[in-house]
Amino acid sequence: MIRAEDDHLWSDSDPDLIIRHTPDGWHLPWTDGHCVPTLDKAQWAGTIAESTTSQLRLTEAAGLCGVPIWQLRRLITLNFTPEISIDSGADTDTDHDTVPREWAADIASRISQLIPKAGTIPDVGLYRAAAELSERLGLTVTTDGVEELVRRGYLHTAGTYEHRQLYSGLDIEVLTDTAIVAAACAEGRLIDANEAASYLDIRQSDWTHLVRAGLVTPIRSQRYWNARYRAADLDALETNHPDIDWDAVRSTAKGRRSLLAGLPTATA
């Protein structure tokens, strides 16, 4: 059993197992200098180190290493650990995977070197991704902006959790260009059909003809059932269709036939 005494923990079955509190946290002596921040994490790590079982559950292996299980899973997925067969899917919330104690001890012995490779941000959901980017970059990052970053290849999806999309914590961590993120938020803003006509400063009847002619295409979004359109696509309409007299369309009086009525209907 792990006992607590002043500034250290010790095992009553292994006199050599001592976990001391330092200014950096609780030092795990079987690691390469790694410390855990709290007493309960240190006690958990000590309990695993004290045990004699030859196989450890993955949560126990992570505890022995003094890292959250997502960091250990990521190291395995990125092949920074000796080859091991586990279910690394993000939707796996069970603890049925087991690993040899020797394997976990090897990882623990160099965990401080491996942590930077795993990153410090777990794969997160849409709203958490927006919040993380906002805090790190000092911008107001929207969920539309996050989805646009994915479309542009700056951010990747990372599986699902409880059927909800996750976004790569590693990508969030290295995404530091505020101009790229700000542009994604502005140009990736999703506008619904009711707002689109006002956004373009045209009448709703004009908008209906643009949709009918296939000149505007909605973007798919997991969050919305009804059609949404990217601001960047709407902004590009005049440039992409210079044959349309947009000033005349906008100046057509209410109740008059739309100048876009003659556009051919798009075929499927």
Image (tube, rainbow, N blue to C red):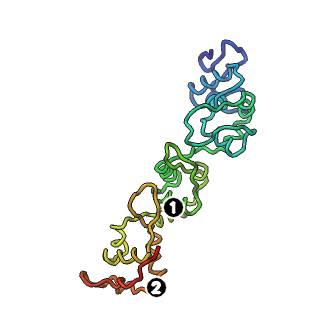
Q: Position of residue 158 (x, y in %)?
A: 58, 49
- Rendering quarter of residue 224: bottom left
Q: In front here: 49 or 20? A: 49
Q: Position of residue 36 (x, y in %)?
A: 61, 31
Q: Which residue is mark 1?
A: 148
- The residue located at (57%, 48%) in the rendering is 159
Q: Position of residue 28 (x, y in %)?
A: 67, 27
Q: Quadrant of the N terminus?
A: top right
Q: Which residue is mark 2?
A: 242
User: Looking at this rendering, what residue extends furthest in the front direction?
Assistant: 268
Q: Amino acid at mark 1?
A: Glu
- Rendering quarter of residue 192: bottom left
Q: In front here: 103 or 266? A: 266
Q: Amino acid at mark 2?
A: Pro
- Rendering quarter of residue 55: top right
Compared with residue 115, is residue 11 higher up or lower down, i.e. above or below?
above
